Amino acid sequence: MPDNPADPPRTGPLDAELLDRIAAHLTRSARFDDIQARPAYAPNSVVADYDLGYFPGGVTRAYLRIRWFETDDFNIHYAEQYNTGESWECRWDRHPNDHNTREHFHPPPDTPTLGEDEDYPDEWRDVLTTVLTRLDERIEAFWTE
């Protein structure tokens, strides 16, 4: 319970054990070139950099940044960075907030604050499958346009 009832609820403590399991799970995917569990520059996250061979030449970086909390709240941020200096981003969220339902999606290209309400599976593996499937569709579209 927040100290002040007017304060929004919080996500709770980081689930470090689950983040380690997520990192191990992602290492089994050929999609990623580098996976870091709680690196110094993002100690509350797993950061998974995509293998750039999946992307056209103008993409200089594509990555997932995953945060998961003991409350089963999460934040999964995906970003593509381009050699033009621009980026394309989206985010899957489950957390208390005042802009959407607890489960929501911030659409690309710039993850606006007002997202779209969503329903996510309860199991973390199923959430990742949902996210990775949508990102696979995004990546495939590069090659079919």
Image (tube, rainbow, N blue to C red):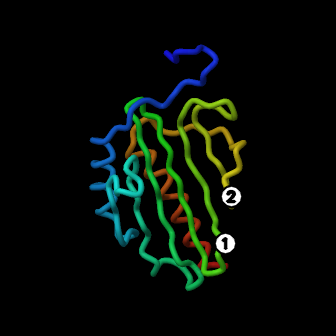
Calculate the distance from the C-alpha at mark 2 to the C-alpha at mark 1. 10 Å
Secondary structure at badge 2 equals: loop
Amino acid at circle 2: Asp
Amino acid at circle 1: Glu
Residue farthest to the bottom, as pictured? 57
Q: Position of residue 110 (x, y in %)?
A: 68, 58
How many numbered markers are drawn? 2
State left or right for residue 70 relative to residue 79.
Answer: left
Specify few, some or many for label 1: CA neighbours under 10 Å numbering under 14, 14-19, or 20 or more: few
**Among the 4 quarters of the image, the one containing residue 84:** bottom right
Name the quarter where the C terminus is drawn. bottom right
Q: Which label was assigned to residue 110?
A: 2
Q: Position of residue 74 (x, y in %)?
A: 47, 40
Depth check, front residue: 84 or 32: 84
Secondary structure at badge 1 equals: loop
Q: Residue at x 57, y 29 (%)?
A: 96
Specify few, some or many for label 2: CA neighbours under 10 Å numbering under 14, 14-19, or 20 or more: few
State left or right for residue 48 relative to residue 81.
Answer: left
| 82 in relation to 40, above or below | below
Q: Earlier in the sequence, mark 2 or mark 1?
A: 1
Q: Position of residue 48 (x, y in %)?
A: 40, 62
Q: Residue at x 56, y 78 (%)?
A: 59
Q: Residue at x 51, y 65 (%)?
A: 136
| 72 in relation to 79, above or below | above
Depth check, front residue: 118 or 69: 69
Depth check, front residue: 22 or 120: 22
Mark 1 sits on what residue?
Answer: 86
Q: Residue at x 39, y 42 (%)?
A: 124
Q: Position of residue 30 (x, y in %)?
A: 35, 70
| 139 in relation to 27, above or below | below
